Amino acid sequence: MNVILAIVALILLTIGIVWVIDKFVPKKIKPILNLVLWALIIFLGYITFNLVYDEIKFNQLKEERFKIVIEKLIDIRDSELAYKDVNGKYTDNFDELIKFVENGQVPITQRRDTLVLDEERTKAFGGVETFKTLTLIDTLDYWNLKDSIFKGSDRYKSMMNVGIGKPGAKFTLKAGKLDEYPVFEASVEKSVILADQDKDLIVKENQVVSVDGVNGSALTVGSMDEVFTKGNWPKSYTNKE
């Protein structure tokens, strides 16, 4: 933006110079100077247009690629959540996660409370029957992750691949615990997604701080620093949040 403002200022300055020449420069020299200055104005205008248009095209391409990557991150997130429901933790191994999607079944459970005799308290109260509440978890059925989330698609087999931008790029997957709570994080740098684009525009994108944009230098779902399973993108990028 600073470059564009500088060029616009230079164009305005050049137009001012043309006006000064028209008023005060001898007639013999005017045509040549005016021609040179108008050529400069047209050239600078062309550069300004290209700078603006290139940024517009970059933003359009960026949004298209981000949407593709976000869909993949949501698949990873949904698979990780199901994995934790069964195993009590997340995994940082894509092969293990894919195997789970392929073969794993997630139980459908129902919680219910029931009263049972508290033998110790009954004895303590001289035989007066005392009851305690127990919470029981019944398994009603199982659901298949592959069919439920992926609807028969085999895209889960390549969920580790970014699939756009830098050839062969893969998501970074981390998992662990934070204060005894399981956490995970899947991410990819914006510079990977936009690897074939203008480097200055990528640097500018990495510095975005906006309600409508993806803040930071990476697209991320989950977090290793807090118990959080959502992504760092605004709702405008997807209808699945």
Image (tube, rainbow, N blue to C red):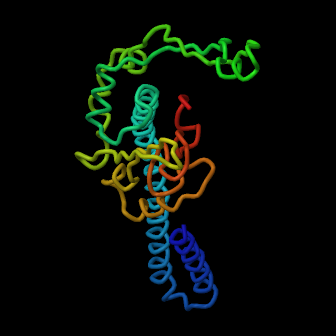
Q: Classify 150 as above or below 211.
A: above
Q: Residue furthest front?
A: 126
Q: Nearer the viewer, residue 61 or 44?
A: 61
Residue located at (43% from left, 11% from top) = 142
Q: Residue 128, how many percent across, how many down?
A: 76, 13
Q: Measuring from the top left, give residue 127's x and y in whole percent.
A: 73, 14
What is the x, y in percent for residue 11? 55, 74
Name the side, left or right, on which 9 lies relative to 187: right
**Residue 107, quarter of picture:** top left
Vertical comparison of 35 with 212: above or below: below
Examine the rendered structure and indicate whether residue 62 appears above or below residue 90: below
Report how many numbered discs are placed on residues in the image: 0
Residue 215 vs residue 141, the one in the foreground: 141
Residue lying farthest left?
168
Q: Residue at x 44, y 69 (%)?
A: 43
Residue located at (44% from left, 38% from top): 70
Quadrant position of the C terminus in the picture:
top right
Identify the residue shown where x is 61% and y is 54%.
210
Q: What x and y, as percent, mark residue 236?
A: 58, 37
Residue 157: image quadrant is top left
